[in-house]
Image (spheres, rainbow, N blue to C red):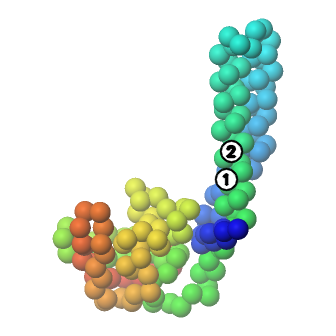
């Protein structure tokens, strides 16, 4: 039997998943149940598009509930107050100077389950996140990305 992967998340990330789970269990389930009741009133289920759509939505929501419950069960919340200051870890904001782009970028290092690269929340398991983990201010870091090697200098580290 294989061991389940442990996920690391910030308190905010866990809170967001718990809120989504609560919404799906309380609000969304009731909405779908109502849709199914209404669709059943339309008659023949073999040709009832509303019923089929509602059942598909129900399957998706139930699958997402199971996914969230498993994720939360296998998550360790990172206690940011216990992490050493001045060293990049999950829950840190890291300001880096990207030498290739000649610009300063701020990343928020999070666990893989709460990564959102569009909003500069990068996973500790991503190429850039991995390269930054454990480093200190003024360290120069290279990360192997799909677009090639990027070189950065850590300008500042702070807690989120």
- Asked if residue 11 shows in the view, the reply is no
Task: State the residue at coordinates (63%, 71%).
Answer: 6
Label total for image: 2
Task: State the residue at coordinates (37%, 82%).
Answer: 156
Disc number placed over residue 67 in the picture, else none = 1
Left or right, residue 158 beside residue 37? left
Quarter the N terminus occupies: bottom right
Determine the secondary structure under disc 1: helix
Locate residue 76: give its quadrant.
Answer: bottom right
- Asked if residue 55 shows in the view, the reply is yes
Left or right, residue 98 beside residue 29? left
In the picture of the structure, the residue carrying the numbered disc 2 is: 63
In the displayed structure, would residue 123 be above or below residue 88? Answer: above
Locate residue 144: give its quadrant.
Answer: bottom left
Task: State the residue at coordinates (72%, 57%).
Answer: 69
Q: Residues within 10 Å of mark 1 (few under 14, many from 20)?
A: few
The image shows residue 113 at horizontal and vertical percentages of 56, 62
Q: How crowded is mark 2: few (under 14 residues within 10 Å), some or many (20 or more)?
A: few
Please say if the residues under marks 1 and 2 sit with CB atoms less than 8 Å apart.
yes
Towards the viewer: 106 or 88: 88
* Residue placed furthest toward the top: 43
Task: State the residue at coordinates (25%, 72%).
Answer: 150
In the displayed structure, would residue 1 be above or below residue 66? Answer: below
The image shows residue 122 at horizontal and vertical percentages of 44, 66
The image shows residue 93 at horizontal and vertical percentages of 44, 75
The image shows residue 130 at horizontal and vertical percentages of 41, 76
Q: Gap between marks 1 and 2, in whole Å?
A: 6 Å
Towards the viewer: 149 or 28: 149
Determine the secondary structure under disc 2: helix
């Amino acid at each position: 039997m294989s061991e389940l992967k442990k996920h690391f998340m910030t308190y905010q990330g866990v809170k967001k998943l718990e809120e989504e789970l609560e919404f799906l269990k309380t609000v969304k389930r009731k909405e779908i149940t109502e849709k199914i009741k209404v669709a059943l009133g339309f008659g023949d289920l073999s040709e009832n598009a509303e019923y089929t759509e509602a059942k598909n939505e129900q399957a998706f929501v139930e699958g997402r509930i199971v996914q969230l419950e498993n994720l939360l069960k296998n998550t360790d919340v990172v206690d940011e107050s216990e992490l050493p200051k001045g060293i990049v870890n999950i829950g840190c904001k890291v300001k880096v100077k990207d030498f290739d782009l000649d610009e300063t970028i701020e990343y928020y290092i999070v666990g893989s389950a709460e990564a959102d690269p569009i909003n500069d929340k990068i996973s500790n398991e991503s190429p850039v996140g991995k390269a930054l983990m454990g480093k200190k201010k003024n360290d120069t870091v290279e990360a192997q990305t799909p677009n090639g090697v990027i070189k950065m200098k850590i300008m500042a580290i702070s807690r989120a």
